[in-house]
Image (cartoon, helix red, strand yellow):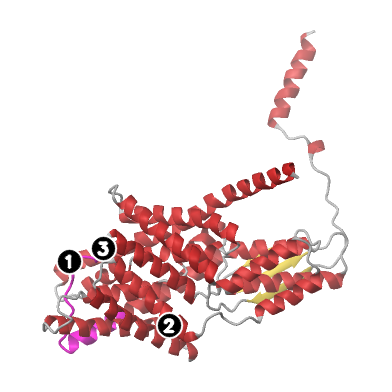
Amino acid sequence: MPQPARRSLYASVRRALHTDPSEAPDTEVHPAVDDTRVIRALDLAMRIGESMFAVGASAHEVTLAITRVAGAYGLQGVHVDVTYTSITLSYQPSGDGWPHTLLRVVRVAAPDHTKLQRMQALLVAVDDGMDLDEARTAFRAIRRVPFRYRQPVVVVARALLAVGASLLSGGSAVLVGLTFVAALAAAATQSGLARLRVPSFFSQIAGAFVTTVVAVVVSALAAADVEPFAGVQPAIIVASGIVLMLSGLTVVGAAQDAIDGFALTAAGRILDLTLQTLGLVVGILAGLELGSVLGFRMTLPDGPPPLGPLPDQVAGAVIIAVAVALFNGAGARIVAVSAVLGTVTALSHAMVLTSDLHEAAASGIAAALASFVGVFIAHNLHVPSVAVTTAAIVPLVPGGAVFYGLLGMVHADPASTAGGGAASLVLAASVGIGLAAGASLGIYLGTPVRATLAGVARSRARVRR
């Protein structure tokens, strides 16, 4: 009698440790699709992915978009490979069909969140059963839509971003006006160079140089007690300009691609970010050296400019968020959402700082909260989450710490300032990493929660029906 019990125990242990081949799912049979339709569907999926990538979508979003479009038209098992400059798509039909491979080179353009919003609406329509020919026609119409705003509006919006950054530091009315003039000159310079197709590296140098020269002139007038420049802190002008020129960089995109496992894309974004930041450094140092040669040396501040009163911080964050949304081509809905998230960012950052946390940790927590809230708002209002998330975290870009570190490294007395300058640059780098990590974490935490709540809402709607 103990024999069957021993066999039963052995079978139970075996089932607990080994998988049963008979429990494997049956092979899925893919529906046969005409080769002409396959090519047309793959071409549409590839073009949608390319357009989304060019206007600011992450590599993960591009991959999901391509697989969604292909799956909607009966093409399962599509393989997508996204790098920083190209997208490759491969599809192997079931049976003995020939494989199909498409490759498109991505020419990254300026972010256009309105076009990205329309692309996402097209994806929803495709999932709902839009005909292939109709979807191709709708895509061509979206791709031909020009940028929402004219170039002068974009230049003024970028200048307003620097105004918001100066308000964060509690700048006076005179300082805010000078910041607007310097930022307007830098933005106009970069806009002109962009029309001439000058590489962004040299455009960063020119913009930083113009901003620094204006700050050096203001510093000289303040040192001579010329009204109304007396008592003005010119370092805030350059710090605000740094926020202006760092706001369009791909810090969050690089971190998100690295977390998603797109190593080549993340490496390309990081290299692009590094080159543009080096251009910014060269432009600032060139402006400071020019001032020193002419006898106008900017006084080294005691440290990065502190944050101003809470009302000024909220006003500055809202102005920055709205300005970022405007020069990224956002519509009224995205602008309104960006303003709300800018307020959330400023308030949460101020509250976290009261707990004596490190500034990098406080910035990361504020960015995580803003992106978490942004995921829900963006989904309910049908706007791209990347649009509102980017606008929300730009107020926390450490422009003051970057400028103070650079200014400390070129000061006349290196023995007394090199340490402070290096420490400030390390602080700026840690804050930047905290912003990127916090924004990515907020998106990853908010996405499954949003999907769960959406599923519950659909279930309740079915029950009521």
Mark 2 lies on a secondary structure that is helix
Q: Quadrant of residue 323?
A: bottom left
Q: Which residues are magenta?
A: 283-308
User: Which residue is rendered at x = 29% and y = 59% of the image?
Assistant: 310
Q: Residues within 10 Å of mark 1 (few under 14, many from 20)?
A: few
Location of the C terminus by quadrant is top right
Mark 3, secondary structure of its residue: loop
Dot 2 and dot 3 residues touching (CB under 8 Å): no
Q: Give left or right: position of 118 versus 191.
A: right
In the picture as drawn, the residue positioned furthest to the left comes out as 224
Q: Residues within 10 Å of mark 3 (few under 14, many from 20)?
A: some
Find disc 2 in the rendering and name its residue.
155
Q: In percent of the image, x 34 and y 80: which residue is there? A: 183
In whole angstroms, how far apart are the C-alphas of marks 2 and 1? Answer: 32 Å
Res 397 seen here: no
Question: Residue 225 location in percent, x, y?
Answer: 11, 82
Neighbor class of circle 2 (other Cα within 10 Å; few <14, some 14-19, many 20+) is many
Residue 217's disc is none
Identity of the residue drawn at 81% across and 61% down: 74
- Left or right relative to 237: residue 387: right
Q: Which residue is mark 3?
A: 308
* Lower position in the chain sequence, tag 2 or tag 1: 2
The CA distance from mark 2 to mark 3 is 26 Å
Between tags 2 and 1, which lies in front?
2
Q: Write down the residue under mark 1.
A: 302
Q: Residue at 74% of width from left, 61% of height from top? A: 127
Q: Amino acid at mark 1?
A: Asp
